[in-house]
Amino acid sequence: MLGTVANALAIVIGGAAGLLAGRSLPEPVRQAAIQGIGLAVLLIGLQMSLRAGPSPCRSSSLWPWEAYWAGR
């Protein structure tokens, strides 16, 4: 329970700090930061997807790496 409260508090404090600091940044810097965060999220998701391997919920036509995982 303490971890949940600490996490929620950290999110609120970080969000408030981001709002205050974001207003002082020029628009190109703000745009670059948003694009960088988006790219990082995309790469982390792709990495986690590749690490998970094939799933019975996915169609084999949607999972092109099935042959790769079968050889492991």
Image (cartoon, grey):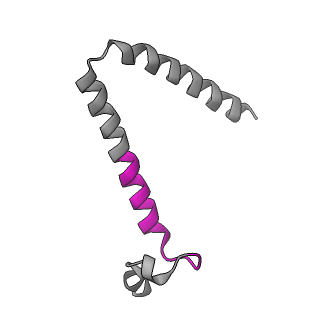
- Residue located 38% across and 18% down the image: 22
Q: Main secondary structure of the magenta part?
A: helix
Is the C terminus in the top left, top right, bottom left or bottom right quadrant?
A: bottom left
**Residue 25, image quadrant:** top left
Task: Find residue 10 and report its horizontal and vertical position in percent.
Answer: 58, 26
- Residue located 43% across and 82% down the image: 61
* Vertical order, 45 against 13 (above or below): below
Q: Is residue 49 left or right of residue 40?
A: right
Foreground: 25 or 50? 25
- Residue located 26% across and 18% down the image: 26
User: Magenta residues?
Assistant: 40-57
* Vertical order, 36 against 58 (above or below): above
Is the N terminus in the top left, top right, bottom left or bottom right quadrant?
A: top right
Is residue 12 visible in this depiction of the protein? yes
Task: Find residue 45 and report its horizontal and vertical position in percent.
Answer: 43, 56
The count of marks equals 0
Is residue 72 visible in this depiction of the protein? no
Q: Is residue 10 left or right of residue 63?
A: right
Task: Find residue 3 and report its horizontal and vertical position in percent.
Answer: 68, 34
Foreground: 4 or 19? 19
Instruction: Tell me if residue 43 is in the magenta stretch.
Output: yes
- Residue located 58% across and 80% down the image: 56
* Vertical order, 59 against 34 (above or below): below
Task: Find residue 29 and report its horizontal and vertical position in percent.
Answer: 25, 25
- Seen from this angle, which residue lies furthest left? 28
* Vertical order, 52 against 6 (above or below): below
Instruction: Tell me if residue 10 is in the magenta stretch.
Output: no
